[in-house]
Amino acid sequence: MAAPGTAQWSSRFAFIMAAVGSSVGLGNLWRFSAEAGSNGGGAFILIYLVCVIFIGIPVLMSEYMIGRAGQASSAVKSMDDLTSRSNVGKFWSSGAWLGMIASFLIVSFYCVVAAWVMAYIPKFLFGSFNGQNADQIAGQFGELAGDPKAVLPWFFVFALLTTYLVSRGVNRGIELAAKYLMPLFFVLLIGLSAYSIFSTGGAGEAFRFMFTPDFSKINGEVAASALGQACFSIGIGNAIMITYGSYLPKTVSIPKSSILVGLTDTGVALIAGLAIFPIVFANNLDFSAGAGLFFQTLPTALSSLPAGNLIGAAFFFLAFFAAITSSISLLEPSAAWVAEQFKLTKQKGAFIVGAAITALGLVSVHHQAFFDFIDQDLVGPIIAPLSALMVVLFTGWRLNKVIVNEQIEGEGEALGRFLMIFVRYVAPLFMAFILIYGIINRFFLG
């Protein structure tokens, strides 16, 4: 039960939309396609689905349980409370601290990527790619990313919008944005997928690539990539779901909600693949290009299609919706902690943290190497997986069993007890594998 004065989601639908909005981000639109394209298509997707069900969802359930049981608005305070009630050392609160740090660092450079997305909407609407060849279109992204003056206006707008929505609180800010933007996101995504499937000529190859697994392509590297993408996509290991769980009413089933959020996020990734892969195959594009796929190769293909400018603008509006719902969730853990720790209003806490992430983001705007360091060397391989590992170990082995039973009893109780088997025995092993593999791959083999 939440502490007196702690806000709560107004309905299960509002919580699901906010949680899905947090999970569904730019990574679903380009990282999933890039990872699947680089790792065998259907084989990667099959392992990805298994990882979501048996690892991602149990970890997600652990974070919701800690949040709702912790009786605090911030993830750190929730963990502190539960360590005391479970008679274990405060060391375990490091899992929440690491997650909060991860989300803070991520949102600082996430605002930079979102600024690129916003800049591309008028590029399509006003025909900036018309009459240009592939090299010229690809070059526009390099020019944008290398020109801080061109990026800064969009960066400030997005950072301010993120801060403003978080400052309005759970119900009037985060929930309101998610309840309206996520349904629009789904409609736009499905519409773009239908257009891509029926109008580009690459649907047959895309379906075969995505849904016909070649088991000969499954190896340790593919499995590690699928597991990492599953955890990255759902959004575990960054304190968001602990914070969101603290606003969750007792009447909502945590096991069922965890499954619904995990599978919805996975469905979005698959539908996004159906929007992107037909275009990729129809135009012989490089689907392993990551951000380059989104900002260089896709604009090249879309600019040559009938109504390509409108379709391109729609793609980037879609990306903007994904970015804003994710960015507000990334800012929320730090804002909640600052407000709670220093006894400030949520508005003041949000604007203090918003100013800090804006200052840090300015470094990423001006220095791409700093951007890459945070994303590829710090958060991805170390901080996020270590946070998730500590959270799942705490929930499975150190959290008071009475508290565990309180959080899963009622609707979906049998399902919750089944998932706790994976929380205790399966998820820790694989989260440790992600952490060790990421460190070795990045710092010793990369």
Image (spheres, rainbow, N blue to C red):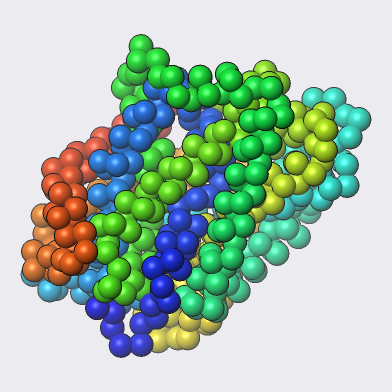
Q: Which corner quadrant of the image does residue 95 belong to? A: bottom left
Q: Residue at x 50, y 20 (%)?
A: 209
Q: Residue at x 56, y 23 (%)?
A: 206
Residue nearest the observer in this picture, 370 or 436 = 436
Which quarter shows the N terminus? bottom left
Residue 252, percent across and down? 30, 68
The relative height of residue 117 versus residue 141 in the rendered view (above or below) is: below
Q: Is residue 287 above or below residue 6?
A: above
Horizontal side of 225 relative to 322 (left or right) equals left
Horizontally, residue 125 falls left or right of residue 428, namely: right
Q: Is residue 33 above or below residue 363?
A: above
For the residue pair 217 and 399, the one nearer the viewer reads as: 217
Q: Quadrant of the C terminus?
A: top left
Residue 175 placement (x, y as % from top left): 50, 71
Left or right for 405, reference 329: left
Image coordinates of residue 187 in percent, x first then y, are: 61, 51
**Residue 362 coordinates in the image, percent (x, y):** 64, 57
Confirm whether residue 374 shows in the render.
yes
| Left or right: residue 86 compared with residue 146 | left
In the rendered image, which quarter is residue 327 located in? bottom right
| Residue at 55% from the left image edge and 34% from the top image edge | 273
